[in-house]
Amino acid sequence: MFREHLKKLVDNVDGAKAALLMEFDGIEVDHYQKESSNIQTLGTEFSQLMTHARRTAQILDVGGLEEMMVKTDDLILVFRIVNEDYFLTVALDSTGNFGKARFIARLIVPRMLEEF
């Protein structure tokens, strides 16, 4: 049911490889990948980082975590909080349009919330 949103995100962003909807405890809800990737493994491993970042923001009283990005030599990962239980991950190649990925992710999250 979420796959159409994930597909729209990946198919409309240059360099996007995959998108994933995941619970903060590391359980995948749904994913879409345009090309082979290890998005499920990345999502599972980075769910701990997202949980820690969210908790740190709460402890420091700087407001709720909305978004996070990780850039490596080969990959850009954009994480967007959906609600208190779920987050969205977009994987792009290192030259992908992460600004557009952030923008479209922000637009589709409210639509995804309607499906919970």
Image (cartoon, rainbow, N blue to C red):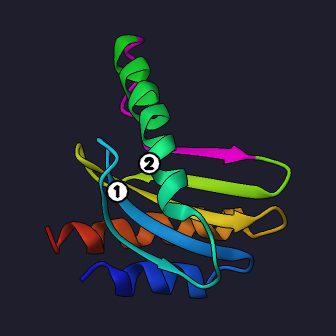
* Quarter-of-image position of residue 47: top left
Q: Mark 1 and 2 residues: CB-CB less than 8 Å, in contact?
A: yes
Q: Residue at x 58, y 63 (%)?
A: 38
Q: Residue 64 colored magenta?
A: yes
Vertical placement of residue 4 versus 21, above or below: below
Residue 76 at x, y percent in the picture: 71, 56
Give, as a three-letter code, the residue at label 2.
Answer: Thr
Which label is found at residue 14? Answer: none
Q: Residue at x 74, y 76 (%)?
A: 15
> Quick one: label 1 or label 2, which is nearer the N terminus?
1
Vertical placement of residue 40 versus 6, above or below: above
Along the line of sight, which residue is nearer the eye, 55 or 106?
55
Where does label 1 land, which residue? 22
SS state under label 1? strand
Give, as a three-letter code, the residue at label 1.
Answer: Met
Residue 42 at x, y percent in the picture: 55, 52
- Residue interval drawn in magenta: 60-71
Along the line of sight, which residue is nearer the eye, 66 or 24?
24
Residue 93 at x, y percent in the picture: 76, 67
Tag in front: 1 or 2: 2
- Residue 11 seen in this snapshot: yes
Q: Residue at x 30, y 78 (%)?
A: 2
CA distance separating discs 1 and 2: 8 Å
* Quarter-of-image position of residue 24: top left
Which label is found at residue 44? Answer: 2
- Residue 79 seen in this snapshot: no
**Quarter the C terminus occupies:** bottom left
